[in-house]
Image (spheres, helix red, strand yellow):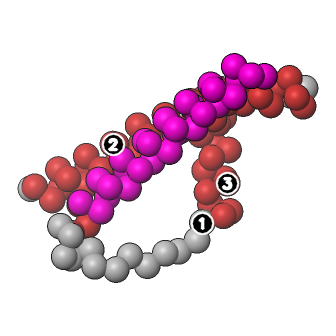
């Protein structure tokens, strides 16, 4: 039962992070791309779709060594979720800083 709960939790967190990444892309798009290229704004679902296409097209397999010693697959999944959250947050902060000089 614990394993099922962990799997469901990781899936829900991944869905939430996909929406957050879509939000991040839509904000950065509206800050920089709309005016520069004269294109329309992206909604969050459209941004999530763009991200999924780009991730699918550019995914590279990386073998992760030693996952058994470091707490297993669940710990690895948690670390990847935190990294994904931080990636989007750092992109928003950097974009905001650049926007101040734009």
Please state which of residues 27 and 86 is positioned toward the viewer in this rendering: 86
Mark identifier at residue 12: 2
State whether residue 45 appears in this view: no
Secondary structure of residue under mark 1: loop
Quadrant the N terminus occupies: bottom left
Mark identifier at residue 59: 1
The residue pinned by badge 3 equals: 54
Q: Is residue 50 above or below residue 40?
A: below
Please state which of residues 11 and 58 is positioned toward the viewer in this rendering: 58
Crowd tier of the residue under label 3, counting other residues whose Cα lies within 10 Å: few below 14, some 14–19, many 20 or above: few
Q: Is residue 82 above or below residue 27?
A: below
Q: Marks 1 and 3: in contact by CB < 8 Å?
A: no
Find the distance from the CA under tag 2 to the CA under tag 3: 21 Å
Please state which of residues 54 and 29 is positioned toward the viewer in this rendering: 29
- Residue sitting at x 41%, y 37%: 16
Where does the magenta region start and end? 75-102
Crowd tier of the residue under label 1, counting other residues whose Cα lies within 10 Å: few below 14, some 14–19, many 20 or above: few
Displayed quadrant of residue 70:
bottom left
């Amino acid at each position: 039962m614990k394993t099922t709960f962990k799997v469901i939790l990781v899936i829900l967190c991944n869905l939430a992070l996909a929406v957050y990444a879509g939000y991040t892309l839509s904000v950065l798009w509206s800050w920089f791309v709309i005016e520069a290229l004269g294109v329309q704004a992206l909604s969050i679902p459209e941004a999530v779709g763009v991200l999924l296409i780009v991730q699918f097209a550019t995914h590279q397999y990386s073998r992760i060594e030693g996952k058994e010693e470091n707490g297993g697959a669940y710990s690895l999944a948690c670390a990847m979720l935190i990294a994904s959250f931080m990636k989007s947050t750092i992109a928003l902060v950097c974009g905001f800083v650049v926007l101040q000089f734009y």
